[in-house]
Image (tube, grey):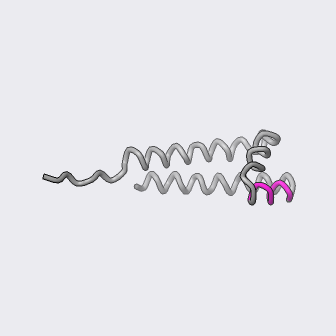
Amino acid sequence: MFLFYFGLLILLIASIGFLIAAFKESIWWGIGCLLLSPVSLIFLIMHWNVAKNPFFLQLIGLAIMFVGGYFFAPQPLPTH
């Protein structure tokens, strides 16, 4: 369970980093990324050089969350 929350923390930090990169580019990019999901994808494509590190960190956080949730999920008690 710890691994899931650790991945969630990494994902949250990376998402904030992505928003910071968008706001550094322009206030309109930041507001767009904050309010509309497709704008984030457009920002990622158009400004790959500044958005790639937070993006890859988000992917790492998602992978850690998947591993923590899938492999270390509580198992049901056996019934006899």
**Residue at position x 55%, y 46% in the image:** 62
Q: How many marks?
A: 0
Q: Position of residue 40 (x, y in %)?
A: 75, 49
**Residue at position x 29%, y 51% in the image:** 75
Residue 31 among those drawn in magenta: yes
> In the image, which residues are magenta?
28-34
Q: Position of residue 65 (x, y in %)?
A: 49, 49
Which quadrant of the view contains residue 35? bottom right
Above or below, 60 relative to 19 = above
**Residue at position x 86%, y 57% in the image:** 28
Which quadrant of the view contains residue 27? bottom right
Among all residues in the image, which is located at the extreme front?
80
Above or below, 50 relative to 1 = above
**Residue at position x 78%, y 39% in the image:** 45
Q: Position of residue 55 (x, y in %)?
A: 67, 44
Query: How would you classify the magenta stretch by its main secondary structure?
Result: helix
Say which of 38 and 13 sits in front: 38
Which quadrant of the view contains residue 49? top right
Among all residues in the image, which is located at the extreme left?
80
Q: Position of residue 2 (x, y in %)?
A: 42, 55
Residue 66 among those drawn in magenta: no
Q: Quadrant of the N terminus?
A: bottom left
Q: Left of 70 or right of it: where is 80?
A: left
